[in-house]
Image (cartoon, rainbow, N blue to C red):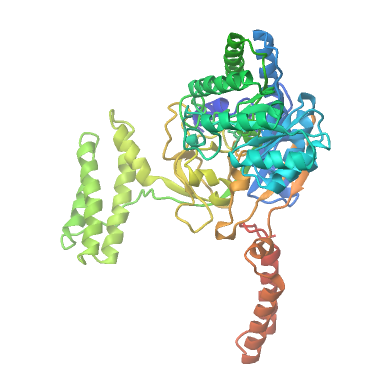
Amino acid sequence: MSNWSPEKSADLFGINNWGNGYFRINGSGNVSVTPMGANGPSVDLFELTQDLLDRGIRVPIMIRFPDIIKARVELLNNCFSKAFADHGYRGSYRGVYPIKVNQQRHLVQELVKYGKDYSMGLECGSKPELLVVLALMHTPDALIICNGFKDAEYIETAILSQKLGRNTIIVVDRKEELKMIIDVAKKFNSRPKIGFRAKLNTQGAGKWVDSSGARSKFGLTSVEIVDGIEVLKQEGMLDCLELLHYHIGSQVPSIQSIKSSLKEGARFFTEIYKMGAGLKYIDVGGGLGIDYDGSGNSDSSVNYSEQEYANDIVSVLQTLCDEKGIPHPSIVTESGRFLVAHHSVLVFNVMGVNDLHRNEPPSPASKSDPSIMQDLQYIFEKVNKDNINECFNDLFQAKQETLQLFTYGVLSLEQRAWCESMYFTIATKMMIMAKSVPDTDDIIANLSKELCDTYYSNFSLFQSLPDSWAVGQLFPVIPIHRHEQEPTREATLADLTCDSDGVIEKFIDTKSGEPKETLSLHQFNIGEQYYLGVFLTGAYQEILGDLHNLFGDTDAVHISLNGIGYTIDHYVPGDTVTEVLSYVQYGRSEMVDNVRQATEESIQKGTITKQEAKLLIKHYEEGLSGYTYLEELE
Ligand SMILES: *Cc1c(COP(=O)(O)O)cnc(C)c1O
């Protein structure tokens, strides 16, 4: 065994950087989860996975850790308390969780529970989300912030909920909504709590910038805000305008963008306040980012800590309000990603590997073979440490030529196959050689890309990591065990869908922040299980996931740690094939009936036996009740 160690693995995969103290590699070489930090209780993720499999829960599996949610809620609230104390700020902090980030009922219930002591509220961006929020949260004083497109029904529901004692604030996202709010308020003789969403000029940065700027979808321009204030004044309702909101986008990578947008937003606040509105809250939206790659300097990362975020918001607001002699407002944040991203891990198994390395050359080319074959034979025999650069260029040229000659009809299929085998034999030989030759980084990089393995994996990218496909988001992917062994392979991952986009070909690099094209993995041995985990998947992925190729929701479990071991709080079974098919209007009984009729006809014709027909129907019915992912036979 090499002198590899779990520590080296931790370093290679950067887990101590992106793991945030929640994930680490333990002495047995497995990933362990420590929601309350290194000294708190821990669970071994590999052992947990095996325990779950023993109970009949299936991979791919989404494992959620509510203790991490609790830790995140406490962390964010404590950062603001500390910032208030350090600065002598006189407002309060009233966080809300935007449920669109992950609306799973158990998760929202956990957030409400852990947020209770902090009067943490919820944000809804649509009518259905408001209905969820009204059913799930009764925390006194907690805010309910209503954003998104609104019709009269949304507004009526929101205003009537105020009569239940809920602290519902309706945010005017488009100017048409103000009149609707005023009409509904008159109808029910109520004083609504109103917010204005300002369209800031300041742009965010990163992948999700489109939420800000003059052309953003939501928000009022300065002209619309001034007009709106006039309307409210005429209606005698200016005191109802309690909140000013803006949102510059998600996963803001730089603290500079956060500060400059806040400076603009805070100026809106102080001006509107001076115009006589009853402003109490400034709602700075979401955007608090997390460090997906642990680098601190990329779009998948952030260049600030949550404490700096809180400090900067508090100090900018304090300065601007003091300058204008305005009381310090309560601060609302709508952080979603920050609260929930860390809490879920997707675990799946590898089903097989496409390995392109070749140690044995094909039988030697002879004088009568096409010259391209003799060229390749020559490169194979002659390559050495001194001519490796030259041979590398020749090899790439030979590869192009092989494909052309085949297309032109010069090479037969067998000859092309010989050339490809020889190509991969030479590439394998050069790769080993290049490692002991200085200044061959380029060659090594190119060859590793050519030779990299494909690990076929039991999950759907479209269902479980949609942002990886849609916006090229990077997530940390690492094996959850075998870290005491050196990972000797370089690979990309292919999912179960037949879509060529269903692959992961970009991986985090904690050191540079630039994505890598391959992932270091262990040798896959047939007959042994090899499990990978995708981490930090709790935000947006579950609800954005789709049914491409009819792969449905995965099994999900909620795991709480209690110091001695763990408990399974909830098991949420994934979709069955029947459920997924019903979304596209297929009825189970009709399908079974059709196949049964076909078997009856074939029994009559004598092309299938009764026993075979019985077995076919059995497989068919079990298939319909089964998991949409690959399962081990019992
Ligand atoms: C999506 C959204 C959020 C959540 O943003 P995060 O970056 O996940 O914190 C907050 N507010 C509004 C208005 C949103 O649309």
Provide residue 398's location: percent of width, then percent of height. 22, 51
Give the answer, above or below, for where 421 lies relative to 508.
below
Provide residue 157's location: percent of width, then percent of height. 75, 44
Q: Residue at x 47, y 39 (%)?
A: 519
For the residue pair 458 and 301, the one nearer the viewer reads as 301
For the residue pair 610 and 148, the one nearer the viewer reads as 148
Whether residue 137 is visible, yes or no, is: no
Provide residue 215's location: percent of width, then percent of height. 47, 37
Tally of numbered discs? 0
Give the answer, above or below, for where 441 lies relative to 607.
above
Q: Is residue 612 left or right of residue 519?
A: right
Q: Answer with the quadrant where ligand 1 appears in the image.
A: top right
Q: Residue furthest front?
A: 234
For the residue pair 206 and 377, the one nearer the viewer reads as 206
Q: Residue at x 43, y 47 (%)?
A: 453
Give the answer, above or below, for where 217 lies relative to 241.
below
Q: Is residue 103 left or right of residue 495?
A: right
Give the answer, above or below, for where 325 lies relative to 140.
above
Provide residue 87's location: percent of width, then percent of height. 64, 9
Whether residue 631 is visible, yes or no, is: yes
Q: Quadrant of the C terminus?
A: bottom right
Instruction: Determine which quarter of the picture holds residue 336.
Output: top right
Q: Residue furthest right?
A: 164
Q: Is residue 487 left or right of residue 594?
A: left
